Image (spheres, grey):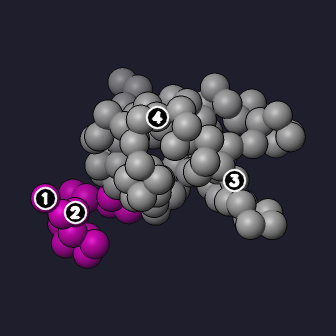
């Protein structure tokens, strides 16, 4: 099921759309595991806290292309931030966005 990109209802606002994108991205167990892994790995932007695709492939028992497809979905919704250095792309978790997502459901 695809999420409509046009907001056509007076009851659905931009925030609802963004929350739905994140929820859709977290609808796969591997993507949840990737978010959880980066949340523990990226405690700050230092040499020891860098995660790239190679690290994710080694950590999870999936092919590089499968990991890349899931990372793209997480990146597209804004949960993963990428930074290119030399020939590597480093991944960081957008903790602020994840916090906003969880606070959205705080009743």
Q: Which is more foreground, mark 3 or mark 4? A: 4
Tell me, yes or no, whether the two marked residues, 2 and 1, touch with CB atoms within 8 Å.
yes
Cα distance in 3D space between marks 3 and 1: 30 Å
Which residue is disc 4 drawn over?
60
Q: Which is more foreground, mark 1 or mark 4? A: 4
Q: Is residue 63 visible?
A: yes
Tell me, yes or no, whether the two marked residues, 2 and 3, touch with CB atoms within 8 Å.
no
Tell me, yes or no, whether the two marked residues, 3 and 1, touch with CB atoms within 8 Å.
no
Cα distance in 3D space between marks 2 and 3: 28 Å
Pick whichever, 18 or 53, lies toward us. Answer: 53
| Label 3 Cα crowd, 10 Å radius (few <14 / some 14-19 / many 20+) | some
Q: Residue furthest right?
A: 47
The mark that comes first in sequence, 3 or 1, is 1
Which residue is disc 2 drawn over?
3
Magenta region: 1-18
Q: Residue furthest bottom?
A: 6
x 82%, y 34%: residue: 48
Which residue is disc 3 drawn over?
90
**Vertical side of 88 occupied by 48: above or below:** above
Location of the N terminus by quadrant is bottom left
Pick whichever, 62 or 89, lies toward us. Answer: 62
Q: Which is more foreground, mark 2 or mark 1? A: 1
Picture disc at residue 1: 1
Cα distance in 3D space between marks 2 and 4: 28 Å
Q: Label 1: state its secondary structure.
A: loop
Residue 88 image offset from top left, x and y in percent: 71, 60
Q: Residue furthest left?
A: 1
């Amino acid at each position: 099921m695809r999420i409509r990109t046009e907001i056509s209802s007076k009851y659905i606002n931009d925030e609802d759309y963004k929350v739905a994108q994140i929820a859709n991205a977290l609808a796969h167990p591997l993507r949840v595991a990737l978010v959880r892994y980066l949340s523990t790995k990226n405690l700050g932007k230092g040499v020891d806290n860098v995660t790239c695709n190679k690290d994710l492939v080694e950590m999870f028992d999936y092919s590089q292309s499968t990991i890349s497809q899931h990372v793209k979905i997480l990146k597209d919704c804004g949960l993963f931030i990428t930074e290119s250095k030399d020939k590597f792309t480093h991944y960081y978790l957008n903790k602020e966005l994840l916090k906003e997502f969880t606070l959205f459901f705080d009743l």
